[in-house]
Image: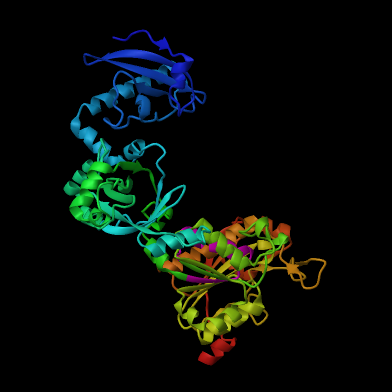
């Protein structure tokens, strides 16, 4: 039996404060002998947004799964939009009744609440409670003491004081920070509402689910607030929750007595509050793949030296940081000019600053969880002479210098002193019509097998007249290649991908990857393909493509002659 719907008035629609509904109807339905009242709600984006249904006859918020504040039900989306309002409302009400049938089963309620426990925890956090930012590793389930920093806008938690201070330093905080102890514990199963409201309830939960966490908490002083971070595992993975145990009023107790275990627990139980807080994960595992990136441990441990932070090198540095590389050292002697900005990772605000130093500052700010990002505004040779021992520590060296006067000596160093440490070289052909990513180790083949004594490819990819398209500014020595950010994007992807493949072990040297543009774009730029390129281009195909070119000992360079 269905009663006639009643149109909702504006104040009734406005009661759903987190939504803007344009129309709605109140309706009563009898289902299995019980009457349920619903609000059917439509916003201004219908039919491109789903009709919402709120259960208004009983308050099941934080009692049933998929129930939001004010009884709004989180219902499955239709496979395709329903344009007719009546049809869409009928379908939504049918889904609502189906959810009610499921929620009559206790097993369903418990399993669904545990499966999405973070959603319900977030709904139950206390108003005006500062959020907690976490650098913790949730996959480590051990109960342990953690480091906590209380800021004006948020609290930051990490595995130790060094990690917390490094994150704050990367965010630009230079003054000393007071770090205190907090607690991490992992619950045996994901909690369900009602969540702990008082210290006694929290301690009972810990005693049942994680007794070791109570023992760690017992070591914290009660003279200040204590952050407790709780982990739990659901079918969707590990999740974190945070509570703040407020400092109790110790009036009537001697200071020397307050930290005795029995008195401390009594003070917490009777004179403290438990404040549930939202928690945001800033740990590397979450930032770089939501906990699913299997390659991340290798990338986090990797130490990469990047030489050349110009248009290509700066973008490669950003991609490596975004991918999860934990340690980056950037070296470039040049300052950023306005003409660089159109292709560079930095912007107008950094003009006049050294490229390596400014880029390191930017990366530390954007990826504050990184272990280390350093910038050095000197030529790579000067950096090497000052820190020769550091070169031994790097897992990968990346050269995006773009000048033979600097890359030639690097190739000599690699041949004589580099050992088996991989070096990735990246550059673009004239007008960005082809991009190259080359990884080498050891002596032969070396860079001199690929590039001649003038720094040009021994076997070119493209053919040009009059040195191709090199341009100059109306000033001495200011030569440049006129290519744009799209050409650069293709090159940065090629070089970055090869770097990552080397770091995770899926590629070993030597390897020469080439991205070649379309024949149409090359012709328009005034160039043509070399005979060597045409050997690799699929017959009849004129589009852009990527391929690997074999690298062989040239038998002409000094390296080959020395090993002959």
The image shows residue 413, relative to residue 223, as above or below, that is below
Q: Is residue 168 visible?
A: yes
Q: Quadrant of the N terminus?
A: top left
- The residue lying toward the viewer, choosing from 270 and 276, is 270
The image shows residue 471, relative to residue 222, as above or below, that is below
Residue 66 percent across, percent down from the top left: 32, 31
Residue 183 percent across, percent down from the top left: 29, 54
Q: Residue furthest right?
A: 474
- The residue lying toward the viewer, choosing from 465 and 37, is 37
**Toward which corner of the image does residue 269 lie, by quadrant?**
top left
- The residue lying toward the viewer, choosing from 47 and 215, is 215
Report the side of 343 relative to 67 (left or right): right
- The residue lying toward the viewer, choosing from 549 and 279, is 279
Residue 500 percent across, percent down from the top left: 46, 65
Identified at 27% across, 55% down, the residue is 255
Identified at 34% across, 20% down, the residue is 93
Identified at 27% across, 42% down, the residue is 271
Highlighted range, magenta: 304-326
Total numbered labels = 0
The question of residue 309 being in magenta is answered with yes
Report the side of 29 relative to 431 (left or right): left
The image shows residue 300, relative to residue 246, as above or below, that is below
Q: Residue furthest top?
A: 4
Report the side of 148 relative to 407 (left or right): left
The image shows residue 203, relative to residue 72, as above or below, that is below
């Amino acid at each position: 039996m269905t009663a006639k719907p009643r149109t909702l008035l504006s104040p009734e629609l406005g009661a759903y404060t987190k939504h803007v509904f344009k129309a709605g109807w109140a309706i009563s339905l009898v289902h299995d002998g019980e009457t349920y009242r619903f609000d059917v709600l439509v916003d201004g984006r219908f039919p491109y947004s789903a009709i919402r249904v709120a259960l208004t006859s009983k308050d099941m918020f934080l009692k049933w799964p998929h129930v939001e504040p004010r009884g709004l039900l989180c219902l499955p989306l239709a496979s395709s939009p329903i344009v007719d309002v009546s049809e869409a409302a009928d379908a939504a009400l049918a889904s609502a009744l189906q959810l009610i049938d499921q929620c009559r089963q206790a097993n369903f309620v418990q399993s669904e609440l545990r499966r999405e426990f973070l959603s319900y925890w977030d709904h139950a956090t206390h108003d005006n409670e500062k959020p907690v930012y976490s650098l913790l590793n949730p996959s480590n389930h051990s109960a342990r003491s953690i480091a906590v920093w209380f800021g004006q806008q948020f609290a930051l938690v990490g595995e130790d004081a060094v990690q917390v201070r490094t994150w704050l330093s990367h965010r630009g905080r230079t003054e000393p920070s007071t770090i205190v102890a907090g607690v991490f514990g992992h619950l045996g199963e994901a909690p369900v509402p009602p969540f702990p409201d008082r210290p006694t309830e929290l301690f009972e939960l810990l005693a049942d689910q994680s007794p070791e966490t109570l023992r760690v908490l017992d070591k914290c002083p009660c003279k200040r607030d204590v952050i407790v971070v709780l982990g739990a595992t659901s079918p969707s993975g590990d999740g974190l929750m945070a509570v703040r145990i407020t400092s109790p009023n110790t009036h009537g107790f001697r200071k020397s007595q307050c930290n005795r275990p029995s008195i401390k627990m009594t003070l917490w139980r009777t004179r403290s509050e438990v404040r549930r807080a939202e928690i945001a994960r800033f740990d590397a595992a979450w930032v770089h793949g939501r906990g699913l990136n299997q390659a991340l441990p290798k990338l986090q441990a990797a130490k990469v030296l990047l030489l050349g932070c110009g248009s290509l090198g700066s973008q490669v540095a950003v991609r490596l940081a975004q991918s999860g590389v934990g340690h980056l050292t950037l070296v470039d002697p040049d300052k950023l000019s306005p003409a660089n900005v159109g292709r560079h990772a930095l912007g107008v605000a950094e003009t006049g600053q050294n490229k390596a130093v400014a880029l390191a500052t930017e990366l530390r700010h954007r990826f504050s969880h990184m272990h280390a990002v350093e910038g050095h505004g000197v030529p790579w040779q000067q950096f090497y002479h000052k820190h020769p021992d550091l070169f031994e520590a790097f897992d990968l060296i990346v050269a995006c210098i773009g000048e033979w006067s600097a890359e030639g000596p690097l190739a000599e160093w690699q041949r004589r002193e580099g050992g088996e440490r991989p070096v990735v070289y990246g550059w673009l052909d004239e007008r960005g019509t082809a991009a190259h990513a080359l990884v080498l180790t050891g002596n032969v083949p070396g860079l001199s097998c690929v590039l001649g004594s003038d720094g040009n490819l021994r076997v070119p990819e493209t053919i040009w007249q009059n040195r191709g398209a090199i341009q100059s500014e109306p000033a001495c020595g200011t030569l440049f290649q006129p290519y744009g950010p799209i050409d650069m994007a293709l090159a940065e992807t090629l070089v970055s991908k090869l770097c990552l493949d080397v770091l995770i072990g899926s590629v070993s040297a030597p390897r020469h990857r080439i991205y070649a543009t379309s024949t149409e774009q090359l012709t328009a730029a005034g160039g043509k393909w070399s005979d060597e390129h045409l050997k690799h281009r699929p017959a009849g195909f004129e589009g852009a493509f990527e391929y690997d070119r074999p690298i062989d000992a040239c038998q002409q360079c000094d390296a080959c002659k020395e090993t002959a």
